[in-house]
Image: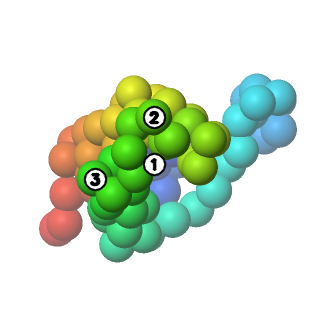
Amino acid sequence: MRFLHPDSPWIGDEEVADDELVIATTRDELITLAGAINEALEAVDEWEFDTRLGVTPDQAKALRDRINDVLRSELRPE
């Protein structure tokens, strides 16, 4: 995950790797996504997590933690 600041001009397709996807989201949407990941970690047993969600619990935790890092460092309310 990379964060593009809203005041940065669009760089172009050559800056996006083949396995990356560029999305625009609000702070509230990121909070919702992090919360949903956390709920899945709480609700789904570890032995079936990968089968049901397509990622391991550690991968889900890493994504949730990265989203939370972005929320804490980059998207502070003004």
Which quarter of the figure is the C terminus placed in? Answer: bottom left
Percent across and percent down for residue 65 are 30, 38
78 vs 20, left or right, is left
Which residue corresponds to mark 2? 47
Q: Which amino acid does label 1 sit on?
A: His
11 vs 64, left or right, is right
Instruction: Answer whether labels 1 and 2 touch (C-beta < 8 Å).
Output: no
Q: What residue type is labelled 2?
A: Trp
Which residue corresponds to mark 1? 5
Q: What residue type is labelled 3?
A: Glu
| Colour approach in the figure | rainbow
Q: For this rendering, which residue is in front, 46 or 62?
A: 46
Q: Is residue 64 above or below residue 28?
A: above
Q: In this view, does 47 lie above or below 67?
A: above
- Residue at 58%, 62% in the rendered image: 24
How far is the residue under mark 3 from the one under mark 2? 13 Å
Q: How crowded is mark 3: few (under 14 residues within 10 Å), some or many (20 or more)?
A: few
Please state which of the two labelled residues, at mark 3 or mark 2, is closer to the viewer.
2
**Residue 43 at least partly seen:** yes
Which residue corresponds to mark 3? 42
